[in-house]
Structure formats: structure tokens, C-alpha cells
Image: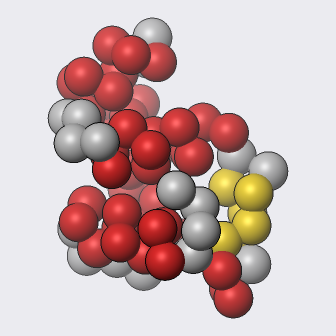
Amino acid sequence: MKEAGSKNLKLNDREVAILRLLAEGYTSSRIAAELSLSTETIRWYRKKLLLKFDADNAVALVRKASDSGII
């Protein structure tokens, strides 16, 4: 598990992998294919990550994850 920034958010390896792929511009369906998961599962993870990082969208999520040193 990695901790994110001053909030000490705990992220598992799957969440970090999804963040890295989002940062590379992958869509949910492409991330799903890459990680051998369903698109719905990726959408669930994205929703949870948006909440953890208090982000309104994927761009803000990636920026906050990058600023936190996660990606």
C-alpha cells in the first residue's frame, strides 16, 4: 500500500495501477482490458479514487495523485 500526501490516503496496488494508466490517457475500457477487469469494475475504482482525492474529474484526480507523489 502507498500513502498519498498529507492526507495519508492508503492506496492499494490496483488503485495505483489505475491512476498510472489514467495519467497515460487510457479510457476505462482500455484500462479494463489492460488489467483483465470489467469496465464496471474500473468505473467503481475511479469513483472511489475521486472520493479519496476529493477530485471532481479525472484530470484533477491525476493532478492530485501526481502532486502527492503517487504517480
37 is higher (above) or lower (below) than 61: above
Taking the spot 53% from the left edge, 37% from the top edge, the residue there is 17
Taking the spot 67% from the left edge, 55% from the top edge, the residue there is 11
Taking the spot 49% from the left edge, 77% from the top edge, the residue there is 67
Q: Position of residue 43 (x, y in %)?
A: 32, 41
Q: Is residue 36 left or right of residue 43?
A: right
Q: Is residue 31 left or right of residue 25?
A: right
Residue 7 or residue 38, whichever sits in front: 7
Q: Does residue 51 appear in this view?
A: no
Q: Does residue 18 appear in this view?
A: yes
Q: Position of residue 29 (x, y in %)?
A: 22, 24
Q: Position of residue 35 (x, y in %)?
A: 46, 18
Q: Is residue 1 left or right of residue 18?
A: right
Taking the spot 45% from the left edge, 11% from the top edge, the residue there is 36
Q: Is residue 23 left or right of residue 41?
A: left
39 is higher (above) or lower (below) than 46: above
For residue 37, what is the image quadrant? top left
Name the colour scheme: secondary structure
Q: Position of residue 34 (x, y in %)?
A: 39, 16
63 is higher (above) or lower (below) than 20: below
What count of labels does the image hold? 0
| Residue at the extreme right of the image, as rendered | 1
